[in-house]
Image: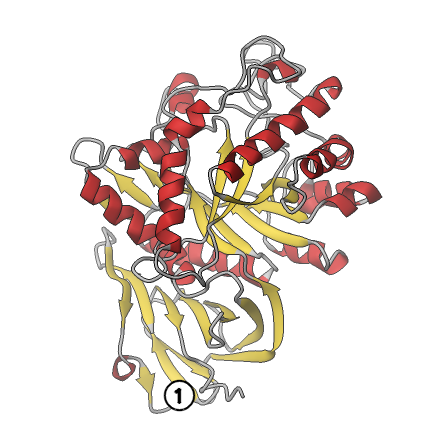
Amino acid sequence: MFTSYADADDTALAAALREIPPSGFLLPDAPDDAPALAIDAFRPRQRIDGFGASLTQASAALISRLPIATRHAVMTDLFSVRRGIGISMLRQPIGPSDHVTRPYRFTRRRADPRLGSLDFSPEARMILPCLKAAQSIRASGDPSVTPLAIIVSPWSAPAWMKTNRSVLGKRPLTRLTGYLRPRMYGAYAEYLARFIAHYRDAGLHVFGVTPTNEPDYPQSRWPSMAMTPAQQARFIADFLAPRLRAHGLGDVRILCWDHNYSTDHYPDGRFVRELYSWPRALRAVAGSAWHYYGGASRTMGDIHRIWPDKGIWVTEASGGEWGPRNWDAALVQTSARVIAMLNNWAQSVVLWNIALDERGGPDYYYLRNDHRHSQNRGLLTIDRRTRTVTRNADYYILAHCSRFVQPGSVVLGHRLEHAAGLHAAAFRTTDGSIAAVVTNEHESPTPLRIGTTAIQLPPRSLTTLTGLQTAIRTP
């Protein structure tokens, strides 16, 4: 049993993925009406493709400035399967996101439909070294480990490809919204394909691509781009899928949407429902990508019930002081949301920035347009002056899954009984063993029956239980 919970002052974690011996959590018995977790080892659900976050340009800049020994220790801690938490998936922005040290671009400012000026040197200089190091650390010493899977997502097409001629989603003064110009669909598809090829040439495994980040949130604060379901369906079916095949990249999964469970214009997954009504687009996509900032995770379950052959991936879920605050609230509330994602057919859980500084930066666009820092929180906080590295609650939420559940594991069916305030997900891992992740919201220790075993969960805790196959009498 491995558990995490905050200290009494809610200023840090008193237990941080602490391993507790059986004598510390096994109970001789529990009341008949005690909460019970029944795991159905014969009802496999979705395959897990990865757990991770994003090595944004901001994160890469902070990590690269650490002393060499500290940098290697941090990267090992994040990506090593044997000596760290085994991050297995990254979502990488194509070009600048909202978390950058400064703006950059891959093409010249004026129109260049043939992409003759295309230059990925900013990516190669600022981000690829960290990605290659992550891939190398993950693969180190074990040929059986799956490669680091990467989903790539653009925040915006180059300005000259858009109707408002800006990388921003809306012009600050006119509020003119930027869509991809129909005449540029082919150029944009080629732009994305060449970026993916650049990653492949660097020895990286590109698992999937989304057409744009958050297509229903174009705004004037940072790079963004609007897309309707019809626009995205046509772009995917007629341009992106054929262009990937032409580059020999037909194995890269196209994931539509890449936005919240629910937005103002597309409540409860309506964007995906409308896109899936286009037969050629439905055939071209592997499935849908989701963020957790609005709506409920059951929307993904609703989509799965209608289209069970289409995958579901959570690609962004940030921590921040605008939401559950660090330590107790973040650990309990956010872990419950992660468990809900897994129980609603998510094949991945990818949080946002791997590292930010003590002010939520680097955050060029926030400072320029909001005149304040982002309030976002990375898995790690790296103090820019002292270079001190703090592992936040978000890091441990991810670690409780990523360390124990590697790609190729499957989520198992289960039911919780008499268990208000408890949340659980169960897995058959790649070595054939059974594990469960459980959040306990209660302020007091809570007994839990699992098959023939009774355990006690610490109050306000996140716990990973391993080796459960004996308790539930699996063959």
Q: In the rendered image, which quarter contains the N terminus?
A: bottom left
In this view, the residue in front, 449 or 212, is 212
From the viewer's perspective, is 373 left or right of 205?
left
Residue situated in front as seen by the camera: 365 or 446:
365
Q: Amino acid at mark 1?
A: Ala
**450 or 184, nearer to the observer:** 184
Which residue is rendered at x = 50% and y = 34% of the image? 93
150 vs 176, left or right, is: left
Colour style of the rendered protein structure: secondary structure
Which residue is at a point 78% across and 33% down the rendered structure image?
238
Residue 460, image x and y in percent? 34, 64
Disc 1 crowd, CA 10 A, few/some/many (<14, 14-19, 20+): some
Which residue in the structure is indicated by mark 1? Answer: 30
Residue 446 location, x and y as percent?
37, 75
* Vertical side of 265 occupied by 315: above or below: below
Q: Position of residue 447 (x, y in %)?
A: 38, 80
Is residue 176 in view from this perspective?
A: no
User: Picture coordinates of residue 386 (x, y %)?
Assistant: 16, 35
**SS type, badge 1:** loop
